[in-house]
Amino acid sequence: MAQPIITKNRNVPTDKIRNVGIIAHIDSGKTTTTERLLFYTGRSYKIGDIDEGTTQMDWMPQERERGITIVSAATTTYWKGIRINVIDTPGHVDFTAEVERSLRVLDGGVVIFDAEEGVQSQSETVWRQADKYKVPRICFINKMDKLGADFIGTVGEIRDRLGAKPAIMVYPIGKEQEFRGVIDLLTLKAMYWEKDPQGIEYEVKDEIPDDMKKEVMEARAKLMEQVAETDDTLLNKYLAGEPLKVDEVKIALRKATIGYKLIPIYCGTSLRNKAVQPVLDAIVDYLPSPKDLKTVEGVDPVSKEKISRKLINEEKFSALTFKIQLDPHVGKINYTRIYSGILDSGSYVYNVNKGKQERVSRILLMHANQREEIDKAYAGEIVALVGPKDTKTGDTLADQNSPILLEQIVFPEPVISLAIEPKTKADQEKLSYSLQKLAEEDPTFRVKINHETGQTIIAGMGELHLEILVDRMKREMGMNVNVGKPQVAYKETITKSAEGEGKYIKQTGGHGQYGHCLIKMNPLGRGEGIKFSNKIKGGSIPSEFIGSVEKGVKEALEKGVLLGFPVVDVEVVLYDGSYHDVDSSDIAFKIAGSMAITDTSKRAGLTLLEPIMKLEMTVPEEFMGEVIGDISSKRGRILGTEKRSKLVVIKTSSPLAELSGYSTSLRSLTEGRGFFYM
């Protein structure tokens, strides 16, 4: 059970706030670490356990059954007078959108690594996502008690594979089953977690074990050199041979962390409750507050000029909704980061994306799925708003008299789809609502109707993603569906620019139809979607018909041209055409737009795109040849291999279409001893 925190002074200065995300590859110990952070800060009365299904942050039945995080969960706690807003994120590739939208609104990150596995495939993905949003971070090398734990090896992988500049802050005392604690390289104090099984109490000693003195002093000298190189004043002292004071090193290290120059590295074992408190200290000492980041950038929604807001209460209100949750008791909950200004419960906010005002009836402080109602939200807070009905993920909320449009969140396209059909007539009636609800919550979940077969097709980021959504339909909405075999979501695209036209003329006895447009199609980069540009000059097509042409163009691209798969990553430029004073209509120009796509695509070098996945397979050395041969037969490309004791990690890329049921195939090849991440 969580303890309420509204009794504390919530209007804290922005320099006393940390908005932090816990991110990592699946099974690195994110949720376990988050549960310890909450326990040691007094936010929870007891330590949640994943295996027992008693975690507070993994609250969904599907999460507790599978022992994995599926949706990001937010909470708030305090440590040494600092308010820490924490978001625990999923590590599975199917739920990468949850990481994306969380990092968009966070100021800092704690990246967790498995001490034996090192940097894994999804570790790289979340690291790049954090790079994209320029999120300063610290690292926690977890599972130091695990057989094969390699602290220095993992630090090397962080440096080499992620291109980071790791700064080792603590040195492990023992490893594997002998792991006892850490030595703080700044203070040279040894901390032992040996007596209290819950890890609340730990012993601090001034003496470093004799057999560790040499390597610890070398590591400390390296740390001092790294920090000094980021600060001219410290560098002059360092080069002059003067000792550096701990306080001045911490100030310089904070600046270096916020400036992406260094990444502080810690280690411990969350499951065994050892060396977790130094991570809390690091969040406070080195990760930025909203005050450190100073401003949030955006554009004026009308002039499109760049503008900014200071991240303080005294500024005009601005916020970003990054997540939607539909609660059966409360209704629609809008998870929102307040960047500037103060929001009062019962007040109106202006949705800049929708161009309309919406009333905020309630403001909630979230602890996973538990709620505490508050009357105000301040700059720097992450809260949940009840009331706004039309707000979607990525929408900016602002003061209507001083609007700002913040950068939206871009989500990846679905890679897999399947057909579903309701089992009964009662289920049929619930289907549309259920799918609409899920799509509103999850921006990577798409629904469409195949008009030729009448089937409902759902698409998502992977088989597990769709399996979870179908399970939610059954549990939360009480409906049963038959599910088809997963199908890979192929796409079409063009490889070169081309021009073409569409002319629709229909003459019947009376009123006819006339629409004529000329377009140019240009290829775009991967993931850029569809762009439509109107370059009509001189009124060759009246402005009221431009939207109809665009609608016809986009419908034709969605249907596909080559093999019926959606056409993506293309720019369509409408540059000329003609019309008839009497016969031209919306429908005529819509059909003309569709015909223009069919005509132009023939000369634009249409080609098929398919999802290519990166795999990281861990197998016993003796099965390496068979596994490589098998993945090569599935059109896989070997990217590299890496030896880890008696195991080999094989990194490959392979078409998703070839990987259906691959976990069973790999287990069969390796006598049940191999596994993979995708």
Image (spheres, rainbow, N blue to C red):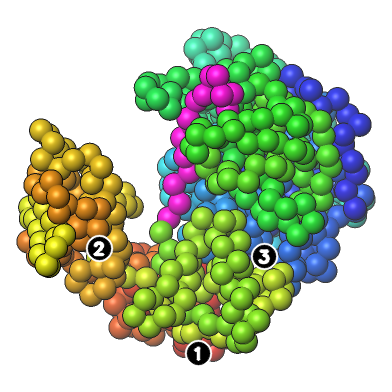
Q: Is residue 608 above or below residue 442?
A: below
Residue 258 in sight in this render: yes
**Which mark, residue 668?**
1
Per the rendered image, the range of residues in magenta is 398-412
**Which residue lies under the disc numbered 3?**
68
Nearest the viewer among 176 and 386 is 386
Q: Image point 59% across, 79% down: which residue?
A: 428
Residue 502 in sight in this render: no
Q: Which of the marked residues, 3 or 2, is nearer the chain's N terminus?
A: 3
- Is 35 placed left or right of 214 in the picture? right
Q: CA distance from mark 1 to mark 3?
A: 25 Å
Nearest the viewer among 469 and 66 is 469
Give amino acid for label 1. Ser
Give amino acid for label 3. Ile
Instruction: Please identify the quarter of the rendering in which residue 500 is found.
Output: bottom left
**Which residue lies under the disc numbered 2?**
556
